[in-house]
Image (cartoon, helix red, strand yellow):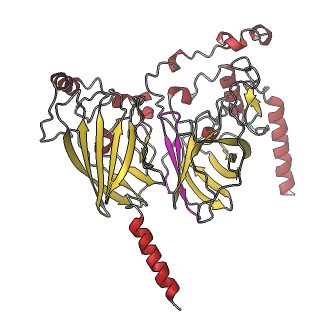
Amino acid sequence: MFRRVLAGIALALTACFAQQNPPLAKDPGAFLPPAPAGRGRAPKQVAGPTPHLADGRPDFGGNGAWYPGFNGNVAEPTWKGVKSADKHVDVPWLPWTLATFNERVNNLSKDDPEAKCLPVGVPRFMFDPYPFQMIQTRDQVVFVFEGDNYLWRIVNIDPAMKHPKNLKPAWLGDSVGHYEGDTLVVDVTGFNGLAWLDQAGHATSNRLHLTERYTRADSLTLKYEVTIDDPGAYLAPWTASNTVRWRPGMELMESICQENEKSSVHMIGTPDAHPADASKAGASKK
Amino acid sequence: MKAWWIGALFGTTLAMAQAPPDLGSGGVWLPRNVSDIAGKIDPPFLDWAKQRFLENHASKQNDTASRCLPPGVPRIMFQARPFEIVQTGNRILFIYEGGAHVWRQVWMDGRAHPKNPNPNWLGHSTGKWDAETLLVDSVGFNDKTWLDDMGHPHTEQLHVTERFTRTSPAAMKYEVTIDDPRAYARTWTTSSTLTFKRGERLGEDICLDKLSK
């Protein structure tokens, strides 16, 4: 009986939110006009089977790098005119995260921490146009990134999946992982709540807890799935996913965002000033 | 009958003999803080370099590291912030907690430096083993970093040779030779000792967090 009452209250609350929620901000549209078909495409690679290390663990490395490309919205299959995440997700917003998301989309993400050279955070680096590599040792998986300030992330392999106590809030959180067959499962907590989940502007709180699953489906394909459990930002856990391609032979270059950084102060976030929006600005403003 | 384990033992010993020295799995290295890497050495400054050194030291205003840019090499090896060494098949990675959360790669696959490297903050590094010592050769630096906190300058001609020798499980000898014919009349060498912290992990320290507050 009590349970039914609770369920009833939950349903009523959800309905309430559904009614009160303002509409979700629209995709701001493509950055650039589409390029002529077939231009600049690399020759198609033939995928081999999932490679393995000598001891049977899946091998996430090799001579090359992973390159997610630009995926601006973790909850939409297309965003800003290009392919984004693998699938659409009905995000279980709390009112503040929906309002924040809409504000960020409407002001063209002008306050994006990434634009100020701060770390993109997890899981966003799996949706961002920076190549990365995964280096596996016996007790760690080290991610090294070309982007941002040329940063790194360490996942400590621990079958007990135990985090240290009293974690200091961090952009990248504390990561522990283990292998489940061909999948690397990573549990991440200890976030500072400042990172965005994507360029569009899905917000996080410092209660963010992620479960990531990395599966090298074949030699050229990394399947990534992340469950976002953040009671400070979303009503319920939700799962986003992306497919990341392997670039054979790619090596990472040093890229220091902070070098001569003078752009972020000029980001004013006026949609009318955005060339791609100039033609539609009149139509959307009424 | 028990020949298999003799064989296994022999095989393992052989593999261990061939494997390169372990430069620090299972822990992190802590450098000593050395603000003046020349110490008692009188570096063979060219005139302009001496002038620049005095200016740098007096004003500190040209210190790009204070704006959260990478401290460069060898300065990052003389700052008391832990780092981890990750040895893989064709590379050795240095993962730094301090100095802008950066990493550095040393190519161990026998490749040469690029002919015309794009000058950058951490250079292009190749390495090889000299018995138990890791020899790292780096070029391709920009001229925006200092060699140390004191402000010893260098140019894009900087060529750094580093020697890493693990003298005991807890200690590593670090020796670095500065070769920059545009800033110093001769090469000069300095050294330090790194301490191993078994079981410790790197933390996250984002320099820009402090700059923006």
Q: In the image, is A17 to the left or to the right of A267?
A: right
Q: Identify the magenta region.
A: A143-167
In which quarter of the view is residue B168 placed? bottom left
Quadrant containing the N terminus of chain A in the rendered view: bottom right
Secondary structure mostly seen in the magenta stretch: loop
Q: Is residue A154 magenta?
A: yes
Between B78 and A93, the residue placed more toward the observer is: B78
Where residue A115 appears, as percent x and y from the top left, is 54, 26
Residue drawn where x is 56% and y is 52% of the image: A175
Number of numbered discs visible in the structure rendering = 0
Quadrant containing the C terminus of chain A in the rendered view: top right
Between A260 and A132, the residue placed more toward the observer is: A132
Residue drawn where x is 76% and y is 34% of the image: A76
Residue drawn where x is 39% and y is 32% of the image: B121
Between A18 and A198, the residue placed more toward the observer is: A198
Between A63 and B102, the residue placed more toward the observer is: A63
In which quarter of the view is residue A96 placed? top right
Residue lying farthest to the bottom in this orientation: B1
Q: Is residue A226 magenta?
A: no
Q: In the image, is B90 to the left or to the right of A100?
A: left
Where residue A4 appears, as percent x and y from the top left, is 87, 53
Q: Where is B31 relative to A119, above or below?
A: below
Q: Where is A219 relative to A116, above or below?
A: below
In which quarter of the view is residue B101 placed? top left
Residue drawn where x is 63% and y is 48% of the image: A209
Where residue A153 appears, as percent x and y from the top left, is 52, 46
Q: Where is A103 relative to A196, above or below?
A: above
